[in-house]
Image: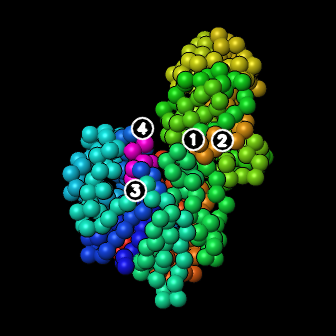
Amino acid sequence: MWDVIIIGGGAAGLWAAGTASARGLKVLVLEKNVKAGVKILMSGGSRCNITHHCDITGIMEAFGNQGRFLKPALHNLGPADVVAEVNRWGVATKVEETGKVFPVSDRALDVRDALVRRLTDGGARLQTGVAVQRFERQSTGQWRVFTEGEEFVARALILATGGLSYAGCGTTGDGYPWAAALGHKIEPTHAALTPLLSPAVWVHELQGLTLEDVRVTAVYGSEKPQRDPRHTSRTSLLWTHFGFSGPAAMNVSGAVSGWEEPHRARLLVDLVPELSESACATLLDAQGGSGKRSLHSVLSQHVPRRMAECLSVQCEVAGDVTLAELPKRARLKLVESLKKLSVPLAGTRGYPKAEVTAGGVCRQEVNPHTLESRLSPGLFFAGEILDVDGPIGGFNFQAAFATGHTAATHV
């Protein structure tokens, strides 16, 4: 009999196995893919953004109202702890300007292999190409796990089966019906960290344009912007032939795909977050000797030329018009466009392009200090199967590692 069986050999499962085996437990990891950590290998453009260079509070804030649930796990394994442990297993790391932590080698394979070494050196057994079909709790309190050809018995079970994003990685939502069968509520799932779609032709005409520093806010219909950190993101934005990609768009995509009618959503783009509205008004003011300057020459100091041309078209003024010739109405509209450019959306590109899944096992039914089910003793959850999803930047791997570590510490 095993002390713990971990179903899922992704980031959360591999970390949990290493922690449990280091405790001297008899550990079995069952992974249905022929390779473990497939999503790790694909992440960060095959470089693997391991975590984010910030403190525990920074991680919690990135997850919004979910951060409170993660707090105990993060105190068990914070970002600095993840980096130290990965370093200990032979993977040197570096911090990029964005705060993202990557292996110096820029090879996700090095990270995956280190996590596998960590568990196997501890005595855990990793079986790949083995799909769990079902499991059940015995009257003795033990768990019996069934695969196509074998049965396994364990004292405890950790579900680290992932979500529905990147189905090609094997994350096909297997854990949701298993958890539901044991009485757990599954919060509605939807794609997160996925590109946004826009029906606006003028958006498509800007394809290839990257704005390095903008603030975007996802808004539903005519509603006012929500004070939810996951509805707003300030970072780079890529304009594409279908809408938007890049970190800013992907960070707010979970909010968009979670709305009942995503096509009613809008994206408000602050093109100059470093400037206030009054500063923008002053910028376009003809006073102070700047009246002879053309609109494009002024705008191009703060946004790329293509964006400046687009704004003049949106506001129905010629780009070569001087500030002195600029009508007051057009000036006001330009200020609004610089600070709150409203773009219609048509939803997202969904799970095929999503990096994580929003929704999942209800947090209220899981003890945040142990990650044990409040409904089924001996059953633990870790990683993306939980109703926890964060922005781009290593935050989701950090949550997976911390929850896997905490679950394995308490089995």
Which of pointers 2 and 3 lies earlier in the amino acid sequence? Answer: 3
Q: Residue at x 42, y 78 (%)?
A: 154
Alpha carbon separation for disc pair 1 and 2? 9 Å
Principal secondary structure, stretch drawn in magenta: helix
Q: Are marks 1 and 2 in contact (CB under 8 Å)?
A: yes
- Which of labels 2 and 3 is toward the front? 3
Alpha carbon separation for disc pair 3 and 1? 25 Å
Q: Amino acid at mark 1?
A: Lys
Q: Tell me the quadrant of the picture where the C terminus can be found.
A: bottom left
Identify the secondary structure beneath mark 4: helix
Residue behind mark 3? 128
Residue behind mark 4? 45
The spot of residue 178 in percent (x, y) is 59, 69
Q: Quadrant of residue 272?
A: top right
Q: Is residue 99 above or below residue 15?
A: above
Residue 332 seen in the current view: no
